[in-house]
Amino acid sequence: MYRGLRITPPFFEIGPKAYLYGRDLLELARRADVLSRIYDVQIIITPQCVDIPLVAGHVERLLVFAQHMDPLEPGRGVGSILPEAVHAAGAVGVLLNHVERRIDRATLAHTMRRADEVGLATMVCADDAQDAVSVAQLAPNVIIVEAPVLIAGGRRNSSERQAIAETNEAIWRVNPDIRVLHGAGITGAQDVYDVIAAGAEGTGSSSAIFTASDPQARLEEMIQAVREAWNATH
């Protein structure tokens, strides 16, 4: 686990995927930077690698994570994403093992070691509680627990919300220093509120933000809901 970055709940992850890039992404990132200060919510953003320098160079509070990287060493590797280059571009962390960019467990462990070597925090995706406990043994900074079936528009039911605290405890029995984000199925502010109120330290969204008619307004609704839920339950 990389110790050089402190992630403090409540926090929120913005996942642009390939919905937004360039100057349009920068505009949203700068607004997110302001919202982070207004609501005192730590925000992680995961731009495409080519946009890392653009975003990192114009924000103060946002934590910029790469969407992915490879475990290679400097040298050969055309088309690969070098950890040293991710760090030099201005990222402070990296997202790994998203359902849209799966890697096997051995490669995940190797990539996490490389992240630690170059000074990058790791945020690793897991499908469910059992998977999350397995990932916890690798000691990432953050585990994102999200059922693939809920990604991009699925809806959580009451039993899934009730399982949040149980999943947290299972992870923390392995490593109490890991931060736990519960994502997927986050379609609006009420979903954000419900997940945080149910015990999540953080949550996040992609499609619900970037397909909204006003992404900045949708983002603010969600960040406000994070703060309100956290205040109500802590």
Image: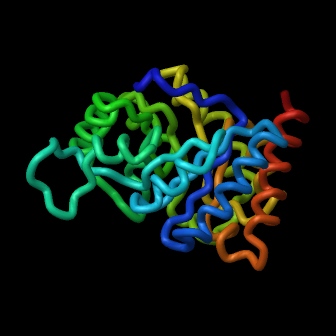
Residue at (38% x, 36% y) in the render? 134
Q: Which quadrant would the C terminus be assigned to in this image?
A: top right
**Residue farthest along the bottom direction in this orientation:** 213
In the image, 157 versus 122, the foreground residue is: 122
Q: Is residue 79 left or right of residue 102?
A: left
Residue 131 shows in this picture? no
Residue 78 shows in this picture? yes
Q: Is residue 179 above or below residue 33?
A: above
| Number of numbered callouts drawn | 0
Determine which quarter of the picture holds residue 114: top left
Q: Is residue 142 above or below residue 187?
A: above
Residue 13: x and y, percent? 61, 50
Q: Is residue 186 left or right of residue 116?
A: right
**Residue farthest along the left direction in this orientation:** 76
Q: Is residue 149 above or below residue 170?
A: below
Q: Is residue 30 left or right of residue 231?
A: left
Q: Is residue 72 left or right of residue 125?
A: left
Residue at (66% x, 39% y) in the render? 61
Q: Which quadrant would the N terminus be assigned to in this image?
A: top left
In the image, 213 versus 159, the foreground residue is: 213
